[in-house]
Image: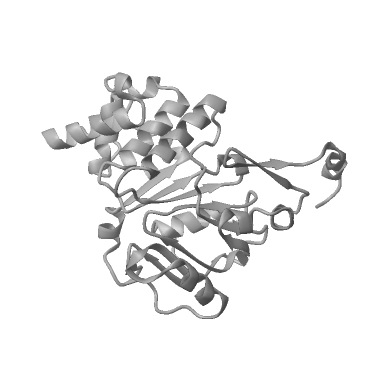
Amino acid sequence: MCPPQPTGVWAEDVAARGAGSHCALAVEEVQFRRGETEILTNISWQVNAGELAAVLGANGCGKSTLLRMASGYLWPTRGKIAVLGHRFGEYPLQLLRERLGIVEAVSVFPFDAAMTTRDVVCSGFFGALTIAYYRPTAAQWQRSSHLLEQVGLGPQRDQYYNTLSTGQRMRAVIARAMVRSPGLLLLDEPTNGLDLPGRESVLAVLAGLHQQPAAPAIVMVTHHLEELLPGTQNILLLNRTGGIQARGAPEAVLTEAHLTAAYNWPITPIVRDGRYYAHTPPRAWPQLLTPL
């Protein structure tokens, strides 16, 4: 089950959003320290099954650290984390990871150079960077091909993975993360370093996945408002010291006051076609020359 009944302000938030067996991710009063440095402070947040969510904030605020804790690769200094109804420490971590899809920008590159795009996607069944030591079934090959069509890479199925563009590689890695139909898909800055068409193609793929029947809960880490998917329902905005600035629906979180406080920089949000953009007037640029 998810963590026991929360208290205080978080209890009100969870009550309003729904709780219990429908939560894909529950983080309760989590703190993370590395040495003497406190990276995350008293983080409580819930993502429901099938929900489209995001962790937003400036560089260094602990976004990626939180995602790595949610995937079980880091352990909180204090607090509790539950994924897909199971609390870490009370359920085999390996079994939980089999129900997670994890995508990091750095994972675009490390596969065997001899692998085709479909090989890379199929490797997700085995949690490996090669399929040289495995014998995929016909169903696994078929699932891999289907997902490549879904992310717009059907024609590149037999192309060597390392000859794809960076944006195409990221779409292939997303397909790889989906081969076992995860209940929770975690993405750490999946559009990092992409040009505009590459970024938009990745966002289009994620938006399409969210529209599929039995879609996983999707949690994406980013520090750019324009990378938030239309239809994002739940945002955790971290401040520069690793605490919560705001959480909840975009219209409540993505305000000028919250964004300016979180980034310690004047930001005016602009909404167009369901997407958010950050604007800073040029008159504020001279502040870059002074300490924040």
Give the residue at x 66% y 59%: 239
Q: In this rendering, does residue 8 appear at all?
A: yes
State the image coordinates of residue 163 (x, y, percent, origin top left): 39, 19
- Left or right: residue 110 compared with residue 283: left
Q: Nearer the viewer, residue 261 or 89?
A: 261
Give the residue at x 35% y 68%: 88
Using the image, determine if residue 212 lies above or below residue 57.
above
Using the image, determine if residue 149 lies above or below residue 215.
above
Q: Nearer the viewer, residue 140 or 14?
A: 14
Q: Nearer the viewer, residue 269 or 193?
A: 269
Considering every residue shown, the one lying at the far front of the view is: 273
Q: Nearer the viewer, residue 30 or 277?
A: 277
State the image coordinates of residue 291 (x, y, percent, origin top left): 83, 51
Quarter of the picture containing the N terminus is bottom left
- Left or right: residue 270 compared with residue 208: right
- Left or right: residue 131 compared with residue 69: left
Q: Give the image's coloring scheme.
A: one colour
State the image coordinates of residue 56 (x, y, percent, origin top left): 58, 52
